[in-house]
Amino acid sequence: MTGRAPYCGALGMDFVMYAPELEKNKNLTDYMSGIMDTLDGSHGVEFTYLPIVYEDDCQVCDGKAEFKQNSKPYYEITIRFLQESINGEHGA
């Protein structure tokens, strides 16, 4: 894992869902929760491994979700790094 640590600071995530309609009994929070779970790491007994962007989805502390009707379903996410990273670099 040397040199592969994820971002450990606070994050913002903006989510835009494009589709004809949302699935029955689903809301934007359901979709965003799944995306947030996908981008974090899996937890071993003593460490986090295979992170994509951040260590844990609880780091996402700011954001918005929006639905835009469209015939083709897809989504866009924007990640904003809100604090210094573990390497001391500043986020946007």
Image (cartoon, rainbow, N blue to C red):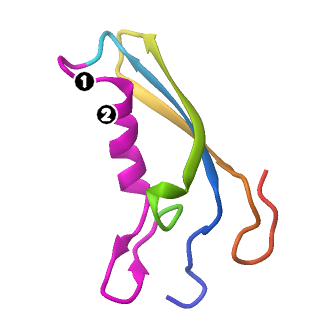
| Residue farthest to the left, as pictured | 24
Who's the residue at 41% across and 10% down the image? 70
Q: Quadrant of residue 5?
A: bottom right
Indicate left or right for 27 with 56 as reference: left
Q: Is residue 73 magenta?
A: no
Q: Quadrant of residue 9?
A: bottom right
Query: Which amino acid lies under the numbered mark 2 shown in the image of this protein?
Result: Asp
Q: Position of residue 82 (x, y in %)?
A: 72, 53
Please tell me whether residue 14 is drawn above or below residue 45 in the rendered image. Answer: above
Who's the residue at 77% across and 57% down the image? 91
Res 26 label: 1
Give the residues in magenta: 23-51
Q: Quadrant of residue 50?
A: bottom left
Q: Position of residue 67 (x, y in %)?
A: 45, 16
Q: Are marks 1 and 2 in contact (CB under 8 Å)?
A: yes
Please tell me whether residue 78 is drawn above or below residue 22 in the rendered image. Answer: below
Who's the residue at 48% across and 56% down the image? 58
Number of dots carrying numbers: 2
Secondary structure beneath dot 2 equals helix
Disc 1 packing (10 Å; few <14; some 14–19; many ≥20): few
Please tell me whether residue 13 is drawn above or below residue 39 in the rendered image. Answer: above
Disc 2 packing (10 Å; few <14; some 14–19; many ≥20): few
Q: Position of residue 20 (x, y in %)?
A: 32, 9
Query: Which amino acid lies under the numbered mark 1 shown in the image of this protein?
Result: Lys
Give the residue pinned by disc 2.
30
